[in-house]
Image (cartoon, rainbow, N blue to C red):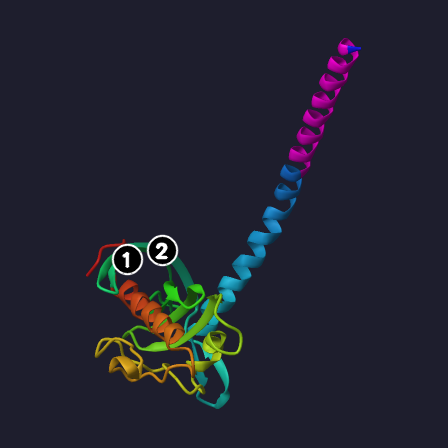
Amino acid sequence: MAKKAESTLKNMLLALTLIALVASLALALVNRMTKGPIEEVNKKKTEAAVEQVLSVPDPSDNTKMVKIYEKCESDTVTFTDTIKGKPTEFTLTRYIAMDSEGKVVGKAIESYSDAGFGGRLKAMVGFDAEGTVLGYSILESSETPGLGAKADQWFQRDGKGNVIGAVLSEKPLAVKKDKGDVDAITGSTITSRAFCGLVNTAYKAFLIEKGGNEQ
């Protein structure tokens, strides 16, 4: 009887091994099949965000937005920014916008702050060639619905905390509680500070010349 039990145990282990193998192969196949479509979706989302933040009102119809560039290329920059008095290293992706002649007309930066109320707050931030804020698009947020989650609209051109047109070369963004000029989201000062922080970090990335060297 003991021999039979041993045989059964071996069969069970073999069956479990085969099941695990088949499951792993199936998962690998699914990942392979979905990788391409997922990458394509993410690419389109990024392109849409870049266009959104590098657009201005159409002079002939200010209800419409027109992008300021003809072509765009990306690079990555690594630098150190001071966050809450501590040096923090960032590696950010930039999208450098150019006109038809190759002249740089602006940059869009994927920036983030880990100081949000719900954790990481990530956004695409657009600047014109002089560093004036043209727009932003929230890419990732875990902020509270109805409060911090309002960041996607609060700081827009028609929002109460509008930052579009801000010139960061004059002074960094800060909420009024911190002696700045930005109206914080009602009940969400922490989120508002995180947003200002990620825009300031984006501006530092904007200043870096192509090639990744800090100015």
Q: Is residue 144 visible?
A: yes
Locate residue 129: give its quadrant: bottom left
Q: Residue at x 42, y 73 (%)?
A: 136
CB atoms at circles 1 and 2 under 8 Å apart?
A: yes
Which numbered disc covers residue 75? 2
SS class, disc 2: strand
**What percent of the width, then of the height, locates residue 126?**
38, 71
Question: What is the magenta range?
Answer: 2-26
Q: Nearer the viewer, residue 26 or 211?
A: 26
**What percent of the width, then of the height, locates residue 196?**
33, 73
Q: Residue at x 72, y 17 (%)?
A: 10
Q: Is residue 8 above or below residue 195?
A: above
Instruction: Categorize mark 1 by other alpha carbons within 10 Å: few (<14), some (14-19), many (20+).
Output: some
The residue that mark 1 highlights is: 210
**What percent of the width, then of the height, locates residue 168?**
26, 76
Q: Is residue 6 magenta?
A: yes
Residue type at the position of mark 1: Lys
Main secondary-structure element of the magenta-colored stretch: helix
Q: Is residue 109 visible?
A: no
Q: CA distance from mark 1 to mark 2?
A: 8 Å
